[in-house]
Image: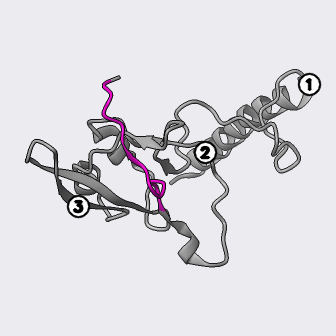
């Protein structure tokens, strides 16, 4: 590199620095444009943007019904084994055997938040929540059972 190229690269560096400082200055001197959140002061009113991936949850209705059929597609598609689906086989009144969800275990400590489980669930039984505070002292608290005790499959088609 000769001296001319060296001086030219210094000027290019200053130009990019000034470009960045111009953008920062615009936000600094424009009080109407709020970019950052005042967390944790606004913890009660904080709203996460749409599409945020906080943690996987299984919604239940007022009758403690969920939509999970226990097919295990989410477990198969999870790249690192964050989901474990345990099912039981029961015999229906018609004499057919049916798979019933026993436990749906979610390992938040192993989750990479890739979204493959939510995306591939055929019954849309699991969704993303907007919860983002996951700090705990005991790692065992990050292993969660998503189906409520005593819950059952919602047989109604929606």
Q: Nearer the viewer, mark 3 or mark 1?
A: 3
Give x and y (percent) for residue 93. Answer: 15, 44
The residue sitting at 81% across, 36% down in the picture is: 45
Q: From mark 1 to mark 2, how far is it between C-alphas?
A: 35 Å
- Which secondary structure, mark 2? helix
Q: Is residue 38 above or below residue 97?
A: above
Q: Quadrant of residue 101?
A: bottom left
Q: Is residue 72 left or right of residue 68?
A: left
Q: Which residues are magenta?
A: 145-157
> Which residue does the image show at 56% across and 76% down from the upper left?
139
Closest to the camera, between mark 2 and mark 3, is 3
Q: Quadrant of the C terminus?
A: top left
**Residue at the image point whose x is 43% and y is 57% from the top:** 112
In screen coordinates, is 52 left or right of 133? left
Label 3: element kind: strand
Q: Position of residue 114 (x, y in %)?
A: 40, 49
Check contact, mark 3 vs mark 1: CB within 8 A: no
Which mark is on residue 88?
3
Identify the disc placed on residue 9.
2
Q: Is 58 contained in the magenta span? A: no
- Tell me the mark number nearer the camera, choosing from 1 and 2: 1
Earlier residue among tags 1 and 2: 2
136 relative to 56, above or below: below
| Contact between labelled residues 3 and 2, with CB atoms less than 8 Å apart | no
């Amino acid at each position: 590199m000769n001296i001319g190229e060296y001086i030219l690269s210094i000027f290019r560096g200053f130009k990019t620095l000034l470009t960045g400082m111009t953008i920062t200055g615009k936000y600094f001197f424009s009080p109407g444009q709020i970019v950052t959140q005042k967390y944790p002061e606004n913890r009660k009113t904080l709203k996460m943007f749409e599409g945020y991936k906080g943690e996987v949850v299984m919604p239940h209705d007022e009758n403690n019904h969920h939509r999970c059929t226990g097919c295990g597609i989410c477990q198969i598609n999870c790249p690192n084994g964050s989901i474990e689906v345990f099912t039981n086989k029961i015999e229906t009144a018609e004499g057919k055997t049916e798979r019933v969800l026993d436990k749906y275990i979610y390992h938040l400590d192993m989750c990479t938040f890739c979204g493959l489980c939510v995306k591939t669930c055929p019954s849309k039984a699991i969704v993303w929540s907007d919860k983002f505070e996951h700090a705990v002292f005991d790692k065992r608290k990050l292993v969660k059972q998503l189906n409520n005790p005593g819950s059952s499959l919602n047989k109604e088609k929606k």
